[in-house]
Amino acid sequence: MLLQLLSLSVVFISGISAEYKNYDGFKILEVNFQNPRVRKYIQEIDKNLGFMPDFLGENWKQKQAHYFIDKDSVENVKTNLASNNITYQMRDVNPQIFKVRRRRDINGAITINDVNNRYLSYDEQMQFLNSIAQQYPNDVKLQKIGNSYEGRSLNAVRIGDDGSSKPIVWIDAGVHAREWISYNVALYLVYTIVSQPAYRDLLNAVQLVVVPNTNPDGYEYSRTNDRMWRKTRSRFSNGRCSGADANRNYPFFWGTQGVSHSQCSEIYCGSRPQSEPEVMALTNAIQREETRIKGYIALHSYGQEILYPWGHTMRTYPSDVQDLIQVGKAMAAAIRAVNNTDYNVVNSGDGLYPAAGASDDWAKSRGIKYSYTIELSPIDDYTGFSLPEDRINQVCREAFQAIQVLMIEVRSKFSIRQTTSSASSTSAQSSLLLKRMRTAVRGSGRG
Ligand code: 0X9
Ligand code: ZN
């Protein structure tokens, strides 16, 4: 009995790694940007402060931006804000976030129950995918699309790939390592869509490709060394800092706005476009079948936003932006129908901030019609990237509905195989929702 208890505690309450980065004294800066003057300050915050603070997320309902301020900069930031007459809050960081009791890999099968209730290691994620591929060999194929910098396998899950040329919806997750919820959402999606017969019809008409972990090195580093790690883990010769922001490394307006060219920045765009092996692998894989890919979503957190292009600069939109807004709103409505959670549909350059070299813009530039970034929950608290594990399942269920709406739209626009008479009730409901949203958006002009 005692032995059993001891081994359980080793499994479940494994200690905090000695190297886990200490964030004592760091603060969260919260600025309300309702006022246009403050908004302007925020848009040029890097010029105002003389450095780019680490942007965490925003609460669009209250028009508040959250930044992570390192302890040595706190006093300077306060002085600068005061001298510019900017009202702000400086909050303490919840120390619990940096004292996550990470569970070691548990021997035994990883099930959907784990996906719904806890954050998994990269190995556990892959174990889960392998078990799904074994269970549904006709529907699920794992495809290696490359290796990360540290040599981890980058895997795409191909669902409903029957060798035909049906349209594809492509979902990828976790390019930013600390945005843990995105990995669970991707795994939940894979499981749910193959295990529930209700989605058969949809999969007969639309193929889904999911890359559940696009930055495994960064993710493992964020689990073991530094909870706030965002970038890849590439090392540079004679560099002090490691990693590039893979979402600034895509080859479209690379390096122009909302990026940094210095290696230590959280938004370092890399030495050249596609310098990161992860980005090279993803762009190659997408380009191989880009004419068939009609929908693309990059899953990120946090802020509850559905962002549409262009995002490399402000006030610039693709010619079919109305279609993107329409489907974005239908996705938000589908999310709301689950538990009344609000997602804001907004242009990424105007709504959040311009940032060039991101995957959504690049996907759109390759001709993928519906391209989005979704910033998952939360919105309203400072857990931010450490969304409590008891909220994982709801976020997964909500995002699943949004992705289903996109697949339905792609089916109706691009598939030669339309719904058969046995359409599932869920699909029928989403189609109806989409129709209603179209009518509503047409009526209300630009969103
Ligand atoms: O900055 C990003 O890469 C994304 N936000 S996050 O807080 N998850 O880091 C937003 C990217 C939006 N897309 C473009 N600006 N193109
Ligand atoms: Zn992100």
Image (spheres, rainbow, N blue to C red):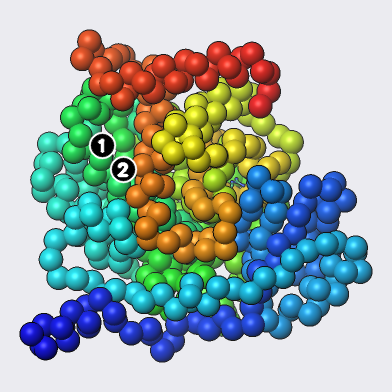
**Vertical placement of residue 115 versus 343, above or below:** below
Would you say 416 lies left or right of 252 here? Answer: left
Camera-side residue: 164 or 81?
81
Q: What is the distance, in whole Å, between disc 2 and disc 1 at their CAs?
A: 6 Å
Where in the figure is residue 75, as x and y percent of width and height?
Answer: 79, 80
C-beta proximity under 8 Å, tags 2 and 1: yes
Camera-side residue: 243 or 443?
443
Write the residue at 29% across / 79% down.
Answer: 13
Instruction: Tell me if I can see residue 119 in this picture.
Output: yes
Q: Which residue is mark 1?
A: 193
Write the residue at 66% across / 18% down.
Answer: 444
**Vertical placement of residue 390 versus 443, above or below:** below
The tag on residue 189 is 2
Q: Hey, which quadrant is residue 162 in on the image?
A: top left
Q: Quadrant of the C terminus?
A: top right
Where in the figure is residue 112, as x and y percent of width and height?
Answer: 22, 52
Kind of residue at disc 1:
Ile
